Image (spheres, rainbow, N blue to C red):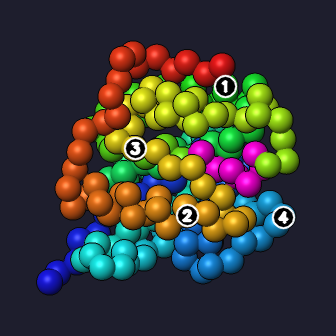
């Protein structure tokens, strides 16, 4: 059986945990301090499939717009990452990412809420709820969403498994009532 290579662009804020997700998935390590984006393509095989994922980490869009554009153009799939802590910066950047993704409506999107381990340390109102994460995914027209923690290795492999499942058997986006992003 020949393998199929799928390019996956992982985008989001600088501190959203993109690089930590990739390091946890590919090398089974977590580094506590900030790790700059790898800005490199990493190829991994998905167990029990003939799919290879070529994964690219990205830097925040305003700082590395040309790199981001290359990733978006090459990627077959986009993974939009944001941390579960609800900040004005995260909300603003989600809107920016949403606007950028609208220019590539044919690209399947998986939305990933990161750093879920922080929920236990914060008040509920300081974090995006499951319902809010679902609404964010719907607003992007995502085919699905995952909540994960690279620190505790919770649901990290699920991100890539969901992409592999979608490659093998595409399914439509989450039900959408309104394409506007509503974040409270």
Q: What's the CA distance linking mark 1 and mark 2?
A: 25 Å
**Residue 170 shown left or right of residue 38 in the figure:** left
> In the displayed image of the protein, which residue is found farthest to the left?
1
Between label 3 and label 4, give the one nearer the viewer.
3
Residue carrying label 4: 33
Task: Quadrant for residue 127, please give it.
Answer: top right
Q: Which mark is residue 92?
A: 1
- In space, the residues marked 3 and 4 are separated at their CA atoms by 29 Å
In primary-sequence order, the first of circles 3 and 4 is 4
Q: What percent of the width, then of the height, locates residue 60?
A: 64, 44
Query: Circle 2 — which element?
Result: helix
Q: For mark 2, what is the residue? A: 156
Q: Are marks 1 and 3 in contact (CB under 8 Å)?
A: no
> Residue 122 is drawn in which quadrant?
top right
- Single out the residue that lies furthest toward the bottom: 1
Mark 1 element type: helix
Tell me whether circle 4 and circle 2 mark residues in contact (CB < 8 Å).
no
- Give the camera-side residue of 157 and 51: 157
- Mark 1 or 3: in front is 3
* Circle 1 or circle 2, nearest the eye: 2
Q: Which residues are magenta?
A: 113-119
- Asked whether the viewer can see residue 134, the reply is yes
- Kindly identify which residue carries mark 3: 144
- Inter-mark Cα distance, 4 to 1: 24 Å
At which x and y percent is residue 35?
75, 63
Mark closer to the chain start, 1 or 2: 1
The reply to whether the magenta stretch includes residue 116 is yes
């Amino acid at each position: 059986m020949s393998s199929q290579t799928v390019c996956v662009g992982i985008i989001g804020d600088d501190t959203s945990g993109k690089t930590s997700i990739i390091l946890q998935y590919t090398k089974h390590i977590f580094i506590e301090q900030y790790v700059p984006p790898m800005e490199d393509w990493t190829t991994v095989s998905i167990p029990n499939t003939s799919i290879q994922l070529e994964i690219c980490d990205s830097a925040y869009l305003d700082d590395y717009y040309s790199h981001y554009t290359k990733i978006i153009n090459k990627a077959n799939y986009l993974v939009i990452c944001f941390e579960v802590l609800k900040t004005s910066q995260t909300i603003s950047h989600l809107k920016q990412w949403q606007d950028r993704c609208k220019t590539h409506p044919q690209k399947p999107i998986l939305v990933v809420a990161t750093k879920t381990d922080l929920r236990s340390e914060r008040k509920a109102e300081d974090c995006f709820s499951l319902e809010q994460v679902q609404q964010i995914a719907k607003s992007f027209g995502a085919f699905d969403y995952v909540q994960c923690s690279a620190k505790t290795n919770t649901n990290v492999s699920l991100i890539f498994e969901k992409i592999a499942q979608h490659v093998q058997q595409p399914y439509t986006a989450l039900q959408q009532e309104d394409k506007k992003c509503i974040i409270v």
